[in-house]
Image: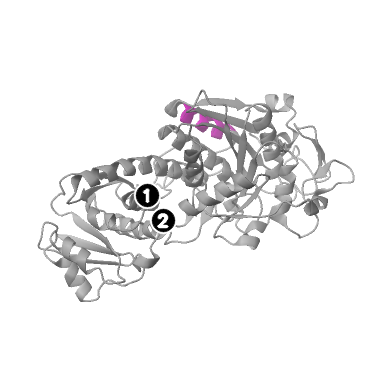
Amino acid sequence: MAENGTTFEFTRGQAEAGDVLIAALPMKPAPLELVARVDKHCDGAVSALTAAKAVPEELGSLAHTTSRGAFRRVLVVSLGDSAKLDADKLRRAAAAAARWLVSQKLRSAALWFDGLAALALDQPAAEWAGGMMLAGFRFTAYKSEPDKAPARIRINLIADDANRAGLALRDIRETTALIDAVNYARGLAHEPPNAINPETLAEQAQRLARKFRLRCTVLTPDRIKRMGMGGLLAVGGGALHGPRLIVLEYRGAPRAKAVNAIVGKAVTFDTGGYSIKPAANMEDMKFDKSGGMTVLGVLRAAAALKLNCNVTGIIAAAENAVSDRAYRPADILHMASGKTVEITNTDAEGRLVLADALWYAQEHANATAIIDLATLTGGVRVALGAACAGLMSNDDKLAADLEECGQKTHERLWRLPLWSDYRELITSTEADIKNASNKRDAHPIVGGMFLKEFVKERVPWAHLDIAAVAGSEDAKSPVGKGSAGFGVRLLIEYLRRQQR
C-alpha cells in the first residue's frame, strides 16, 4: 500500500535558516508571560501580533508574520480558552498548524516546545504531534498527477530545557508508532473494492505479519465451509472472491494466559445483497470494512509499541454481492456455533460474519475477553449521532474500562442496554433466531442482541457499533474528512492497561 499524505518527523536539533517558528498559545486569558518568553526567539514578533489583536481567540485560529530574529516567519496558533483546553482541543489546534504547513509546501519548521510544556495537560507535546500526524493523512494513491504537497516535514523542537524536551521526544516516538498504525488503517479503509477484496485483504495481513513479526493464519472458503461457518460463507458466497477469516496473533506476554481478542467486520463492499441498498452514496460502502481495518491497526501498533500483553486479531472478510450464488431472504443458515438463523434481510450481513468470528475467538483463539468492532447499523447514528460509538456488553467492568479509555482518547463510547426485553425482536418461528427485525425499534440493540447469542456467558465481551464514527465529515478535526481509523487509539489505551 502506498504512503498517503504528509508525515511529520519530530527532532531536537538546530533550526534551519528560513524555518517558521510555531508558537501554540492560549489566547484567554492573555498569555503575557509566555509571549515574553517566545519573543526572545523572534525579536518580539509574537507580542506585536497579540498587541494588534491579530490572533483570534477561537481554537485553531492562525496568525503569521515575518520576523527579524532567528526565524524569518512566525506562526501563532490559538489554543482558545486555557480553562477549557483538553487533549482533543490541542490536537485540533495542531491539525490546523499541520494543514497550514502543508499548504505552504514547507519541508521543515520549528516548534516552541516550552509553550506546550507549560500547559496543564498530560504529555502535551505528544498530543500535539499526534494531531499533526493525523492531519497529514491524505488518500492520494490513485492520483495520476503526483501529490505536490511535501511527503515529509521535519519539526525541530526549540526548548530552553533540553532534558525535558528529550523526554518529550520519547513520548512523541511512541505517539508516532501509534498514529502510523491509525493512518495505516485509514489508508486501507479508503482502498477501493477492486483493490481490496477478501483475498487481497488477507495478503495485506500476511505482509503486515511479516513486517511486524506476527503470526498470521488465513482460512479460505473450503476451510470456512469445513468448520461450519455458515454466516461468513453465505455473506461472501455471492462474490467472485470468496470470504476469508484472517487471524493475527501478537504475543507480548507469552507466559500469561490472558488473551484479548479483537474481532472486526470487514465487508469489503456492501451492496446490501438482494435487500439492495439505494444508489445514493453506495460508493461509501467500501468503508464497511472499517472494523477489520481497525483490527489491523491495533495489531500493528501493539507490535510496534511492544506491549506486554497478548492480542489476537480476527477479521471476518467478505463481499456482500448480488449474484446467482448470493444468499437470499428466507434462507436458513447453519452457524458454526450450531445455531440456525433465518435470513429476513441480506443487508444485515455484518452480524452474520461476526457471529462466526466470535465463535472462532472462543473455540480456537482461547480468548479471555472479546471486543468486536463493526459498522453494523445505520440506526446507531440516529440514536447517538456522530459524537460517539455505541457500546453493548455482557460485562460491566469491561464496558466501564472501555468507556474510560474512550474518554481519554476522545474516541468516545455510549453504552446501550442488552435487556432480555429486546430478545423477542430476533425471535424466529422457523429457526433459532432471525438476523433482523421487521420493526423499526432499536436497530443497534437488535444487532447487539443477535451477537450476544453467540457469546458464552462466562466470556467478557463488548460490541462497538462504529457505523457513525468510522468516517468523519468535520474538516477541522484532526482526521478531517474521510476515514477516521476509529478504535485504534481507544483499544491501544485499553491494551496498555492490560499489560502484565
Q: Which residue is mark 2?
A: 478
Q: Identify the element where label 1 is drawn.
A: helix
Expressed as whole percent of the image width and height from the top left, the position of residue 285 reads 60, 50
Give the answer, above or below, for where 13 lies relative to 414: above
**Disc 2 and disc 1 in contact, CB within 8 angstroms:** yes
Q: Quadrant of residue 85?
A: bottom left
Three-letter amino acid code at the position of disc 2: Pro
Give the answer, above or below, for where 358 lies relative to 111: above
Q: Which mark is residue 94?
A: none
* Res. 191 in view: no
Three-letter amino acid code at the position of disc 1: Gly
Looking at the rendered image, the quarter that the N terminus falls into is: top left
Residue 374 relative to residue 432: left or right: left
Expressed as whole percent of the image width and height from the top left, the position of residue 136 reads 36, 51
Residue at x-position 61% and y-position 45% = 397
Residue at far right of view: 429
Expressed as whole percent of the image width and height from the top left, the position of residue 232 reads 70, 36
Q: Which residues are magenta?
A: 199-209
Q: Which residue is mark 1?
A: 130
Q: Identify the element where label 2 is drawn.
A: loop
